[in-house]
Image (spheres, rainbow, N blue to C red):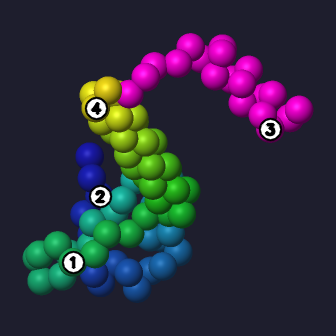
Amino acid sequence: MPQIRPITDLRNTTEISELCHAKKEPIFITKNGYGDLVIMSIEAYEEMTDAARIDSAIGEAESEFAAGGVLLDAKEALTSLRRKHFG
């Protein structure tokens, strides 16, 4: 369940920091009853951006294949890359 806190809670930075690290998910900050900010730990942010980068790469690969791309055997592709980059 998402954490929603009023902006006045940001005065207690230690508590908010501990909450961010304990929950490992964003905390939504409201101002005058409306959404204003989202805060999260660096670890949660990195996980989110890594997942987005992987999703983007998968989407790109699927688009390439749908446009007539060629599938390669994983073992052959890895062997070829090893030869090319490691001699």
Name which residue type carries label 3.
Answer: His
Marks 3 and 1, how far apart at CA: 49 Å
Name which residue type carries label 1.
Answer: Asp
Q: Looking at the image, which is closer to me, 23 or 83?
A: 83
Position of residue 39 relative to residue 53, above or below, is below
The residue where tag 1 is placed is 36
N-terminal of the pair, mark 3 or mark 1, is 1
Marks 3 and 2, how far apart at CA: 47 Å
Q: Which residues are magenta?
A: 69-87
Marks 4 and 2, how far apart at CA: 43 Å
Q: Residue at x 45, y 49 (%)?
A: 53
**Could you tell me if the residues under marks 4 and 3 are in contact, i.e. CB atoms within 8 Å?**
no
In percent of width and height, residue 86 lies at 86, 35
**Could you tell me if the residues under marks 3 and 1 are in contact, i.e. CB atoms within 8 Å?**
no
The residue where tag 2 is placed is 3
Residue 67 - label: 4
* Badge 2: residue crowd in 10 Å (few <14, some 14–19, many ≥20): few
User: Furthest residue to the left?
Assistant: 33
Q: Looking at the image, which is closer to me, 81 or 44?
A: 81
